[in-house]
Amino acid sequence: MKQIININVNGTDYEVAVKPGTTLLDLLREELRLTGTKKGCELGDCGACTVIMNGKAVNSCLVLAVEADGKNIQTIEGLANGNEMHPLQRAFVEKGGIQCGYCTPGMIMRTKSFLDDNPNPNSEEIKQAISGNLCRCTGYTKIVEAVETAVEYLNGRIPKEIEFAPQKSALNLSVAGKRLPKKDAPDKATGRAIYTDDMVLPDMLYGKLLYSPHAHAKIISIDTSQAEALQGVKAVLTGKDVTDITWGTSPPRYDENVLAKDKVRYVGDVVAAVAAVDEETCCKALELIKVEYEELPAVFDPLEAMKDGAPRLFNDKYENNINTRVDHHFGDIEKGFSEADLIKEATFVGNRVYQNPMEPHCAIAEWDRHGKVTLHTSTQVVHYVHHQLSRILALPLGNIRIIMTNCGGGFGSKAATNYLEILSILLAKKTGKPVKMRYSREEMYLYGRGRHKQYITLKIGVKKDGTITAVQQKAILEGGAYSSFGIVSTYYAGSMLATLYKFPNYKYDGYRVNTNLPPCGAMRGHGTPFPRFAFESLLSMIADEIGMDHIDIRLKNAMTPEYHTCNDLDIHSCEFVACLEKVREKSGWDMKKGKMPKGRGIGIGCGGFVSGAGYPIYRSQFPHSNAIIKVEEDGSKAVLFVGDADIGQGSDTVLAQSAAEAMGISFDRISVISADSDITPLGFGAYSSRVTLMGGNASKMAGDEVRMKVFSTAAKLLNTQVEKLEAKNNLIYNKENPESKIQWETAATEYFSKNGPLTGKGHYSPPEGLGGNYKGAAVGTSPAYSFSATVCEVEVDMETGKVKVLNFWDAHDCGTAINPMAVEGQVEGAIVMGMSEVLFEDEVFAQNGKMLNADLHNYIIATSADMPEIHSTIVDSYEPEGPFGAKEVGEGATLPVFGALANAIADAIGVRIYNLPITPQKILDAINSTKLKEKAE
Amino acid sequence: MYISDFKYHKPVSIGEASQILEQSEIGLPLAGGTDLLVEVKKGIRKFSDLVSLSEIPELKIIDVDSQNIYIGAGLTHNGLVYSEIIKNKIPAFSEAASKIGSEQVRNTGTVGGNLCTGASCADTAPILMAYNAQVELTSHKSTRTLPLRKFIISHHKTEIKKNEIMTRIIVPIQHKSSGASFVKFGLREASSISVASSAVMIEFISGICKNINIVIGACAPTPVISKNANKIILGKTIDELIGNSELIESIVIAAANDTIPIDDIRGSAEYRRHLVRVLTKQALALAIERTKILN
């Protein structure tokens, strides 16, 4: 029964009737429509829903609305004074403290209550204070800087300017190359940015999914009659009601059903879908669906699953459950090893980790009366969803509109089509009403698509001087029940080893094996972080054996520009050597390595990644990124339309900078509309670290076209030739005589008046013919590669095995940084995420295949209290294929972290741990095992 | 995720709350809700009525007399962290409270709730047991007190009856020559669940240990009073108990052997036993150090 409560929110009194089970969070979001407060975990673990209640920060998901009766609540919406942001909000915007923005409102509210109590905190106090608010994007570094800046503002002081030396390649740029706040940051700081779950359409229904409780079972029968009879239920769908078309991500392996047809393959496989008037009714209906299963033997370990006679997930394909097999041999491995003075082999095991974006997946579907469906969804890749839905629904692309709302982080978890997207559409079709579906945190883990666990046996041969003669890798990827991105992951695991060091002989054997667990997919660094971890670890072990410095052995083999790798990848710009030298210098490597006491260690790791895949996953001849610019008739503003998605990494801002630089206008004169399939031209989206280079080129090209059109008019007005003109900061002038100038908008207005709309279009396709001719040669190709080196310093408690990460010094070759602040944000975020993966994260399953830690309470990720000091450098570099010389940073920044941290720990404790995560318990076991060995000797 | 319908009550007195609980089909008292609402949302707890304790003023009072400190069970963890009385009289309890969950959880969760949830990894219980705390349970018919060590029966199982509310935690005033400490080990630096914890209260008279209480958390279904470690320490001089001696080794080994830990996702039983040795050594040294300060 509803009860009346009186509550004051942001100074306004409300008298509302609520059910006793309604949380304060749901009252704010659903009843009062104050959607700035976010729902991240619903169990008090993430802090996204933090509000201030009677002066104290609380998780509004764990406060009943009836308990807030008579209380004063402050939410993010109440912080700004009209249009003037609170100093905290301003600081978060200016300092890059906001990426996806989903943790931001809670983070800001927690900080507000903290600074009210402690107006002059030091940075340690800040890190402790915000440690109940999880952020997956920023690595907390820029958030702490933002809080420090806010403290200055609030105390009436002027914050110190950050010392920043621009790269050489950015010296002549006026918009690109600048540390500019993200375009979307003010909306995210004030709670005004709309994410999918913040939307409510008129007469909207809710949908929920029924999951298999068994790891492997035949479906004998499903009885939905009781569920359908429940008041409020509008539709129930099971396997028999949906298409037989299977779907997935990689075209050769479409092996997922829209709803399970005859069997289920993991705890969490989707069996039925329900639409009802609210989520509660959906959940009750799900309990009324009677499914009779016949349990089958299940297999969870890929090494077991590969054996003859193991239970098969698919009877008609994937013999021995081997879903993907890669057999690559480049050069002559026998010869290579025969030339080596030392051959070393070791086996490394990666962990099963989940991306955990702070925003749970959510989708809303609505059909119009002309047979067209519109889907609002939190996705990284509008194009994949569009393409896949077109197949599943058997509709042309034009009958489907995909709109990416603000996306609260992805890291690969939202890179492909998901069940919510498909089934909200099918439920909306059946009911004739809009349907919203969202995942709980637990459902996110069940849907899965995290990093593949990998078993890597790596063998490297070197000469006495450290020169690598041959590399052999066998990788077994634990795939889970379905293919997802797995084919590509398996190829990437092999191909990307060859881009960082030069070696002529390489053999790679890759196996992706199906198991009765949630499917694995693409996560930041896609397939490559574990092989890179293995390689960086083994290289340092080899250096020790041949008595060589760890950085020297890397310099000896380091990639250099214009190199053709043994697996036919073409490296162009490459400042890897500069990265190594930079971190050596900044970390004080030579003073520290081998000179620190036991328990303290330093290690180096390196990495690099593609700046976008050279070939699309859905084969077509379409340009990979496309852009349109439309200039207002008075020339005052330009709008950039681009299909690529800003998932928090800041691509809208970076693309706007590229386009504005090309046009010659200032940053405040451009806005961006992105990732809406009806409005924006095709863009392949936010995956494979592709947007800065590919979207950037398309945006720059569109900007160039606009500039040339404006120049055609300006040349006439200035009585000169187009070739003599230049445009910067909204002025067009004669290079030879800068006094001869005209306002950009004047020329633009004149252009429009004479010619009609002032628009530009741009597109980018990677160079033709990238890569070799062997099977799988496409994976790993790219127009450009990034390079990075990271030194990590740790302290290990030799009694408990606990690691404290003290410092990371990172140097990244990302070409020209279009937005250095955003680049630092990617590096810092990748370092803390990578550190968290190495030290904390692991999905754990019971013997029956049920996940034991499908929440943020037991699956722990790094908090602000765990963050190290991060010192990042962007080295001078210029990539001719990229816009203004730019290439990638987002995924590549993850790659060096694993090896650097593992090497630092090995250095600190004197023994190496081969299995991730490197937990205190494993460290202690390793320390004890060496003690025993020493005793025995 | 939703909470199924229930009857909500917000009594203003303990007697009223107790009566509602008694008459309810399955009534649960709701304190801060940071544990209970999680269980309710996960569907682990079946219930018909929630009885809010938020409007009962006496649950939020801290009182002191010559014998005891009386802590209202409805005080939040942060209420304890920032209480001058708690900080001065029983600082190790204040420290334990400061290490629970996040700031947001500490602003909402209560000490009574933490004890009544009875989780084996709870951080308030070991130190309160070390301090020899009693808990006061009140119904509309009667009030009883019992030692905390008897209150917690097993993981998530306590002595509380259907119509009872934990009203106060009663901690004896610590003697001047005593010291106490609480040390926990979690896997990350904040918002971490104890993998193991160790609480120590020690008292010396004329340099000889007259009173010792070592309590280990998260290593058995309940916090464990390490009788064997206590036995070794009792009667030893302060000098014998300082430093890295074989005696200290035997104490911490005894403490570890008194536990019955399990393997779970946070650590193996063996690792937990090892942690008990490390943590108890630290906690003991810290507690002894504090006796000097108080002396």
Image (spheres, helix red, strand yellow):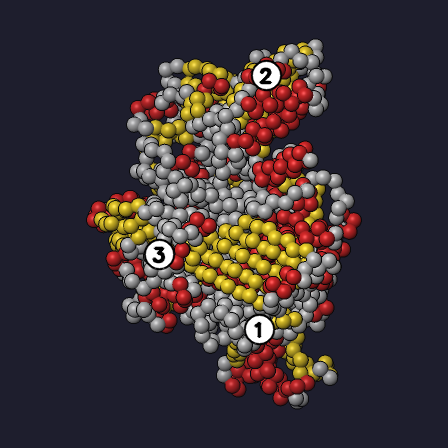
For marks 3 and 2, give the CA distance. Answer: 60 Å
- Residue A51, can we see it? no
Q: Which residue is mark 1?
A: A697
Q: In the rendered structure, which disc, 3 or 1, sits on the residue that comes first in sequence? A: 3
Residue A431 lies left or right of residue A844; in this view the side is left
Q: Which residue is mark 3?
A: A314
Q: Look at the picture and state if B160 lies above or below A129.
A: above
Q: Dot 3: what SS?
A: loop
Q: Closer to us: mark 3 or mark 1?
A: 3
**Discs 3 and 1 share one subunit:** yes
- Amino acid identity at mark 3: Phe
- Amino acid identity at mark 1: Asn
Name the image quarter holding the C terminus of chain A. top right
Nearer to the camera, B286 or A240: A240
Counting from the top left corner in percent of width and height, residue A695 is at 54, 70
Nearer to the camera, A455 or A257: A455
For marks 1 and 2, give the CA distance. Answer: 72 Å
Chain of the residue where label 1 is placed in the rendered structure: A
- Amino acid identity at mark 2: Asn
Per the rendering, the mark at residue B230 is 2
**What residue sits 71% from the left and 50% below the top?**
A544
Counting from the top left corner in percent of width and height, residue A455 is at 52, 52
**What residue sits 70% from the left and 47% below the top?**
A602
- Residue A490, can we see it? yes
Say few, some or many: other residues with alpha carbon within 10 Å of mark 2 (under 14 / 14 to 19 / 20 or more): many
Say few, some or many: other residues with alpha carbon within 10 Å of mark 3 (under 14 / 14 to 19 / 20 or more): some
